[in-house]
Image: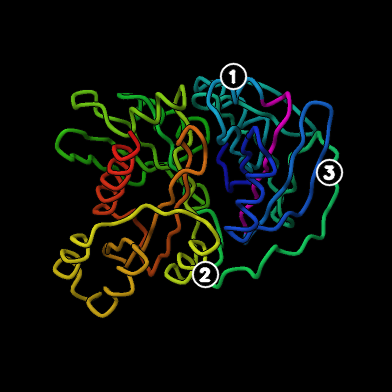
Amino acid sequence: MAVHDVAYIELYTSNRKSVVDYFVSSMGFTRTAEAVGVDRSSALLSQGTVHLVVTTGPATWKFLSAHGDGIADIALTCDDVSESARAAVAAGATVTGTSQGTTTVSAFGGVTHTLVPRDAARIPGPPPGRTWSPLTDAPAAPVPAGRIQLLDHIAICLEADSIETYGDFYREAFGLTRYSSEYVDVGAHAMDSLVVRSDSGQVTFTLVAPDPGKGPGQLDAFLERNGAPGVQHLAFLVESIIPAVHEFRDRGVEFLTVPDTYYDSLVERLPGMRTEIDRLRSAHVLADRDEWGDLLQLFSRSPYERNTLFYELIQRRGSRGFGSANIRALYEAVERDRLAAE
């Protein structure tokens, strides 16, 4: 029943052209195929090993009405689709569809998992059941030097007091094990986080939820705007984050800002990065370190009307963790952005 990889991620939107333009023009993705059907129209975008499907049309309207633009499906490869589907149902999921050897099961909020047969000899193709036409589009502009290599992790915002339930679900349904956990207290607000990961290391979910004993904050705001639990952000691994951030920013990606005081304290917290502080400050990149190495990361603002889904660029220099200090920094940065928008 264990899953191995994320085959693709499907994003539902009311404006496919705008979203495709964002990924292609601003983030360096390439359109590789498209499918036009009676109830939906989709574009397949690729970069590195990341495959995104951007879909609009009547089949998306119910999701969009409830949640707005966002991730509707996270497809997972597995050795035995039938067995994985049975395990998911036994863990509490329901089967929502089948198509050409795949099975789709419910996950959280309005999000599903399509289970795709694993074939080590080839890269998973686009979602089955649609008529796909390959494209040979060139990127709209040169691919940034720090281009995206792979999907590092997916952050999922859940309702309060539900992290343990979903941690158990992902273990029982798909064999994901608990990798780390963190409680972040920022005074008036707090959050729980739990990282679950496949044995292959290719599927990593960071589950986050607000502490109901604290005041409402950004996670509560996400749940309200999204109308349910959902994917909060996708984290893309890049080879070199500072040039990637400068390139993406020049192309129109808006990133969260980081106060200067963060970098003043960073010199004391990570003295080994002293010579890099000015470059990190200029790009507003966050830095952390664990027992294995360094971690650099930065988060975008949401480009969507409901201000829900956003993106992360992350560079790992040996680090295997998720930046404990930066979880707090992210929370505070998003909170500042949220309050400024009110």
Magenta span of residues: 49-60
Question: How crowded is the residue under tag 3: few (<14 C-alpha within 10 Å), some, or many (20+)?
Answer: some
Does the magenta segment cover residue 249?
Answer: no
Q: Earlier in the sequence, mark 3 or mark 2?
A: 3
Q: At numbered mark 3, what does the secondary structure look like: helix, strand or loop? A: strand
Quarter assignment of residue 241? bottom left
Q: Give the amino acid type for the residue marked by disc 2 in the picture.
A: Gly
Q: At numbered mark 1, what does the secondary structure look like: helix, strand or loop? A: loop
Q: Nearer the viewer, residue 27 or 173?
A: 27
Residue 337 position in % (x across, y down): 33, 43
Q: Earlier in the sequence, mark 2 or mark 1?
A: 1
Q: Give the amino acid type for the residue marked by disc 1 in the picture.
A: Thr
Relative side of 99 to 250, left or right: right
In whole angstroms, how far apart are the C-alphas of marks 3 and 2? 30 Å
Residue 233 position in % (x across, y down): 46, 43
Q: Give the amino acid type for the residue marked by disc 3 in the picture.
A: Trp
Quarter assignment of residue 282? bottom left
Q: At numbered mark 2, what does the secondary structure look like: helix, strand or loop? A: loop
> Does 341 appear above or below 215?
below
In whole angstroms, how far apart are the C-alphas of marks 2 and 1? 40 Å
Residue at left offset 29%, top offset 37%: 339
Residue 1 position in % (x across, y down): 57, 36
Residue tagged 1: 94
Residue tagged 2: 146
Residue tagged 3: 132
